[in-house]
Image: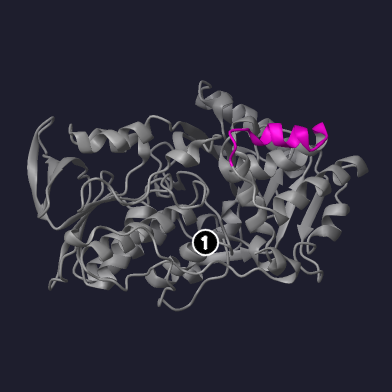
Amino acid sequence: MRVPHPSFAFPAKEGGDVDSELRMSPTPQPTVAIAGGGLAGLAAACALSDKGFRVTLFEKRPFLGGRASSWEHPGTGEVVDNCQHVLFRVCTNLLAFYHRIGVADQIRWYDEMTFIEPGGRTSVMKSSPLPAPLHTAPSFFNFPFLNAADKLAIARALVPLILTVQHDKGKSFQEWLDRHGQTQNAIHRFWNPILVSALSEELNLISVSAAAQVVRESMKSPAAREMGVPTVPLTDLYNKAGDYIRARGGVLHFRQPIEGFTADASRVQLQLRTREEHSQKEGGDFDFLVLALPFDALDKVLPESPESTPIREQLSHFETAPITGIHLWFDRQISDLDHAVLLDRTIQWMFHKSRLQPIRTQAADGAPTGSYIELVVSSSKSLIDKSRSEIVDLALAEVREFFPAARAANLLKSAVIKEVNATYSPRPGIDAHRPTPITAWPRVFLAGDWTATGWPATMEGAVRSGYLAAEALSRAAGFKDSHFLSPDLPATGFMRLFA
């Protein structure tokens, strides 16, 4: 979520090393299998393709992007994203990845964030000329939905979060807020909207370190909080990564998950599912394997061997958190906002897709004919057992509270997408169980936003994990100068004193 780095001579960030006897001399084109076509797998595949590896990527779905993907919804005939994904200028590795594959111009940037209360009153957060971390102070102190006591409490809590490192000591962020004298209104209308949306979990299940990382990164400079939203369906972005891999001699296999693997000191062999149900076949030999899978899918492909025991023990500590996306199509415009944070109700965000991606809803002359919006509910445990019609009714009622023009609009069609296992839950203590890319098999590496990236479950964390896996793999193959990570966004203003 930060400024893009235009070059691809990535600065060094040394990771873990492997024993010298495991090193190999670089070969003309060492082969790498990538299991998983989400952002972690794509980032690893693109980086390794640039390094001269011959990449073969296996993806179980018919499209790329993993949890950041889109497809034609059978009930509506519309192309929908599985969930709205946004980024910030602090996401230096994600932005470098977008530049690498040639889609950086398909992100629209915003430096203002609108908060809406039921009834329609709005408040806007924006930067001022003040140096970081004071750049949003004028708009913050003018928020009408917080009273003076709320603002004072929040300001007191922001000081340790921004200026000091907060470690995970097994306590939840809710407990931290209570210890730091936060009012109920401050928690409900400030901390909850920001952190539940960012981390997809309730405050009493979020570690202090994860919450502090989100706050600190977003305040390190005025650029840090600029938000980017894709102007095309998500899979359109990541198909470009597939083109990038193919252009460098790589191969992509869709509807082809790996079922398992065997690995020794000289090779990795995959087991693949054949077209016949329940049958498997050997998938050929590779020099290396990157397992870029969600943590809840990884256990199914691990061999029944002692080498798997440490990873399985780490996996046992992870839990998932759900996200629900609600798509509504109206026959007329309901708002002139592109996006907004919604307060005090179930829905947390509104994204006006027919404005963000105008080709979706236009007349022949290019004028908008209606509103297509996507509503996001992170940590949507309360919606898991509700039916589609119940969720649509709830969403429609809330939208009409926030946007008065929606009261006269007719709902044309709708879709509800529940991602029950959308992200890992950033619970207190979980960082101790996030694995590095290196495994007990010298030719097998891990990637995924749930691994030890220093970031929560975000697109930036996924790309970082792919680059970290690519760095470790390249070093194992004998390439000592393998550095793919981009530098972090520099702090500005007073934040330079606390970097």
Q: Amino acid at mark 1?
A: Thr
**Residue at the spot 23% in from the left edge and 67% down from the top edge:** 246
Q: Which quadrant would residue 404 be assigned to in this image?
A: top right
**Residue 408 relative to residue 488: left or right:** right
Q: Position of residue 106 (x, y in %)?
A: 49, 67
Quarter of the image with the N terminus is bottom right
The extreme front residue here reads 20
Q: Residue furthest top?
A: 385
Residue 438 located left or right of residue 223: left
Q: Position of residue 82 (x, y in %)?
A: 45, 44
Compared with 378, 225 (above or below) is below
The residue that appears at 39% across and 71% down in the rendered structure is: 100
Tell me if residue 296 can be seen: yes
Q: Nearer the viewer, residue 181 or 46?
A: 181
Spot the residue most to the right.
Answer: 148
Question: Which contiguous range is marked in magenta?
Answer: 168-184
| Vertical arrangement, residue 228 with respect to residue 314, above or below | below
Number of residues whose C-alpha sits closer than 10 Å to that of mark 1, classed few (under 14), some (14–19) or many (20 or more): some
Would you say residue 330 is visible in this rendering?
no
- Which one is nearer the viewer's eye here, 2 or 310? 310
x 14%, y 42%: residue: 272
User: Who's the residue at 62% across and 33% down the image?
Assistant: 171
Q: Which of the two residues, 211 or 224, is positioned nearer the viewer here?
A: 211
Please say if 358 is above or below 179: below
How far from the left and from the top, in percent, is residue 69?
A: 40, 49
Q: Secondary structure at mark 1?
A: loop
Q: Position of residue 273 (x, y in %)?
A: 14, 39
Kindly identify which residue carries mark 1.
Answer: 231
State which quarter of the image contains the C terminus. Answer: bottom right
